[in-house]
Every structure is written in C-alpha cells, then in structure tokens.
Image (cartoon, rainbow, N blue to C red):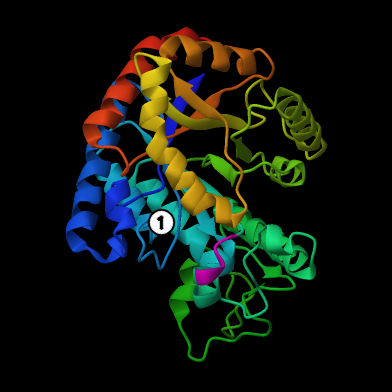
Amino acid sequence: MKFGLFVYCTIGRRAELEAGMAGRRPELYQRMLAELGEVAAFADDAGYFAFGHPEHHLQIEGFEISNDPCLMAMWLGQHTRRLRIVTCGFVSTVNNPLMTAEKIATMDHMLKGRFGVGLVRGYQARWVENYKIRPELAAVGPWNADGPENELNREYFAEFVDVVVKALGHDTIKHQGRFWQFPPPEFVNPHDHPVYVQYGRGVDADMRVHEVGIAPKPYQAHIPLYGGFSQSLRTAKFWARYKGRPIVLSGNTEFLELLWREWEEEARRHGHDVAPGEQACWGGIAVCAETDAKAQALFEDMAWFWKTWATPFGQGLPQLLVGSPDTLNRQIETVSNTVPIEEAFLLIPQGLHTPAQLQDSLDLFARKVMPNFADN
C-alpha cells in the first residue's frame, strides 16, 4: 500500500480565517505557498507517493484558495523530485474538455510523468455560476440531487470525460456530441495553410477541418486517472469504464466491499484487466500523534474547518484517521483486510497547522505506520 497526501490549499490558521477575508491577504498567500512547498518536499523525502490538490476559485475567505490547477501543480512539482502531483481535479463545468486534455498532456511532460489527474463535476455554486462555460449547467449537491440540474450535469460530465480521454489517447479525434463538437461542423479554415495538409492530419486540401488533435502527446502511456472524492456507487461504476479510480474516504466496510466489487465487474465489462487494489483508492482525514488524546486535540481545528466549510455543501465527515500509530495501524488493517488497497490518500490539515505540526504528524506516520503496509 502506498500513501499519498491531499491538501485543500487553506491559506491560514483558524484565527486568521475567523478574522475574515483571509484570501485577500497577500502575506498569507505567500506564506501558504512557502509552506506547501516545504511540506511537499518533506513528504517526498519521507516516502509518500503523491501530493494532491483541488481546483476552486473566488476564495476570498481563504478556505480553499487553490485557483488554477496547472499553476498549483507546477508549484508543487518544483519542490519535489519523486512525488506524483495529483490535480484532482479539473472541474468539467468550467473547462473546455479539449483544452483540458492539452493541459493534462503538457503538465505530464513538465513533470516528466509524475502527474495524475482527476476530473470532477463541480459542487461550489458561487464560482461555478461565474465561471461556467455553458449557461444551462449548474453546480450539484444535495440541494438538486434528485432534480434535472443534476442529471444534466451528469450527462455533460460523461461527455466531457469522454472527450478528454479520447484526446489524450489519439493523434486526432472527431467528436459530435450534445454539448461539444470538435471540430465545429462543416468548419473550413478561412485561409490556405499548406503545413496543415503536408505535415499534419485532419485537414483536407480545401482546408476543410474534419479532425483535431492535441499536442504534445502525453509523456506517460497511461496517466493515472482519479474520480475525485466519492461516496457514490453510481459514480464509481462510471469511472470503471475508463479504469479511473475514485478516492473513497469511508470506513464503512460493507459499502467498500460493494463498491470494490461493482467497480471491478463494470471495469471487466469494458474490457479492462483488474489487479487487486486497482478498484479504487481509500483514505481519510489524518492526524497522527504519540497518543490518541494528543491527536484528537490537534484534530480540533480540522473538525472546525469541516463543520464550518464542508458541511454546508452537504459533505459528511469522512473517515477519520486520527490517533496514535497503534490506533491508525488497527484502523488501516481492518479496512485493508476487507478490500485490497494499492493507494491511500491522507487529507491533512494544511494551513490550519504549522509546517512543524504537519511534519511531526507525517514523520510519525511514515515511521510507525507506513512500513506495516509496505507489502499489502
């Protein structure tokens, strides 16, 4: 089992967030960038395999000031040598899928194959409404889970993922769907350009464009594909058709067994070979300390963060990996005895905790927990 980290890109400590408008304080943003680089470098040296981050915008409050996913991935990549940087993920409702594929391939080269990517549907309505690229789309959450907005978003997302995957895997593509047409139907380039015909593909001598392709081709033959944080069996089965792995932050072993089984069956229906542990990723919020009591005390600010920030979006509290090494070893062993796990992600209280606090927790976990699952 390999362990990776995930951060929300929180700009400040609890008191700084509670003071308001933390996202507009340049000195806090500079500190956050420095601390992210420091923690990522530490994790690289300590033996963690990945470092993940999301895409969120308009974050004047500073709880998730992650902004452009490519820029953050490059910042993290500059401070690491071995870690896989996982952008999780590009939000479909605010990104052109063809351009997203191009960005993914470019990032894969800039990180020389140390890149993994997630594609997600978008749940924060404030910025989705300001950035969305089609007027009929909306963010999704408990408020519209059973309505037409959710189904439209889901249908759009399926097409978005299909375009991204096809563009990454082929020299040129043609896609004519409900939401996107690449290239536009009957598009003819407005002027002659012999390079298109002589040295490329997809353009006829009369300048009619019938296929397009991204450049560069990805560095990796298969970029690791993630489904973002998921508690949905339906979403997990969607990702199985692409052999994309949802990250499931749940301790419900019955649900995990069901999800692993259903994912594998769906993946095999789509012609994928599946090795143990490839069905999904697992994890939870992590704080490791010498004693359970100390870990629980350190967890208080993260508990406040979740209640204040995540709960109003309808997100339940994830699996908690909060405790001493002995406690965490028992928790992880219970789950790993239930379902095979190749990759686990620890959601850490970056920003809320100082780099020293984070490093103490990560060091203890790396020394006292990770070796016990190295061969699992």
Label 1 is placed on what type of residue? Pro
Q: Is residue 217 visible?
A: no
For label 1, the SS is helix
User: Left or right of 182: which side holds 310?
Assistant: left
Per the rendered image, the range of residues in magenta is 122-126
Secondary structure of the magenta portion, mostly? loop
Q: Is residue 302 above or below residue 201?
A: above
Which residue carries the number 1 mark?
69
**Residue occupying the point 74% across, 73% down:** 178
Residue 107 drawn in magenta: no
Residue most extreme to the left: 27
Residue 124 drawn in magenta: yes
Q: Position of residue 19 (x, y in %)?
A: 29, 59
User: Left or right of 157: which side holds 222?
Assistant: left
Q: Position of residue 194 (x, y in %)?
A: 46, 79
Q: Quadrant of residue 46?
A: top left
Q: Please tell me how crowded label 1 is: few (under 14), some (14-19), or many (20+) other residues with Cα within 10 Å.
A: many
**Residue occupying the point 32% across, 55% down:** 17
Q: Quadrant of residue 171?
A: bottom right
Q: Is residue 128 above or below residue 168?
A: below
User: Left or right of 208: which side holds 241?
Assistant: right
**Residue occupying the point 29% across, 46% down:** 13
